Amino acid sequence: MEEINRLQYESGLWAQGLTAIAGVDEVGRGCLFGDVVAAAVILPVGLVLEEVNDSKQLSEKKRDKLYEKIIEEAVAWSVGRVEPSVIDAINIRQASRLAMKQAIQGLGLAPEHLLVDAENVDLDISQTAIIKGDSLSQSIAAASIIAKVTRDRLCADVWDALYPGYGIAVHKGYATKVHREALQELGPTPLHRRSFLKGMNVEQQMLF
């Protein structure tokens, strides 16, 4: 397999004299439960993070280790979250873009260029949308790791305790068999995305 140069996009921008390049990605777009979470990360010019890759391709242990490393090395990083009621109101794509926008605005440093995973963000900043960006750009991969670890920890440490019985810590809100069965039995929580449950035959009684 040929080695992917995960700095090809960054290198081109660095060569133009840009230094503040933010990688942007989101996680949780396909979940039935919980917030969609995005991250924006600006890494130092020339930094190479050997093991960084699309967060979905990494083990949890490896992601946690890289999360610490990215936070340690980053010039700036930030996370944005959009809750289920807003996802239901504006649709998941718009909610994902909003979470990305929030993450970028939270950087505390104005990026000169955005590298975004397959999306465009509603900000007046020059940007490149890269299909499969989390595999092709180190900056986007770093953002995908920050977003994934943040969301997984919310699932395990916060949401699972708030709504026991659904297995949130294990399936992270995705539509697994265990999750669908829990929904049938217990009904949706306030953190379930109503627009995602339509057609799933879930009893629409409100709990809690």
Image (cartoon, rainbow, N blue to C red):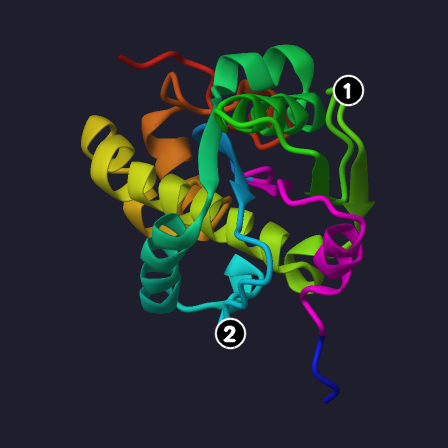
**Picture coordinates of residue 193 (x, y %)?**
52, 23
SS class, disc 1:
loop
**Above-or-below relation of 129 to 11:** above
Residue 182 appears left or right of 81? left
Choose top left, top right, bottom left or bottom right for residue 26.
top right
Q: Residue at x 53, y 52 (%)?
A: 44
- Magenta stretch bounds: 5-30
Callout 1, which amino acid? Asp
Q: Residue at x 37, y 48 (%)?
A: 71
SS class, disc 2:
loop
Residue 188 appears left or right of 195? left
Q: Residue at x 67, y 67 (%)?
A: 6
Callout 2, which amino acid? Glu
Residue 9 appears left or right of 40? right
Closest to the observer, 191 or 22? 22
- Magenta-span inclusion, residue 22: yes
- Magenta-span inclusion, residue 44: no
Q: Which residue is mark 1?
A: 124
**Above-or-below relation of 136 to 190:** below
Choose top left, top right, bottom left or bottom right for residue 98.
top right
Q: Which residue is mark 2?
A: 50
- The residue most toward the front is 17
**Picture coordinates of residue 199 (x, y %)?**
64, 29
- Using the rendered image of the protein, determine whether residue 18 is visible from the camera's viewpoint: yes
N-term mark: 1 or 2: 2
Number of other residues with Cα within 10 Å of mark 2, as a class: few under 14, some 14 to 19, many 20 or more: few
What's the distance in space between the residues labelled 1 and 2, CA to CA?
32 Å
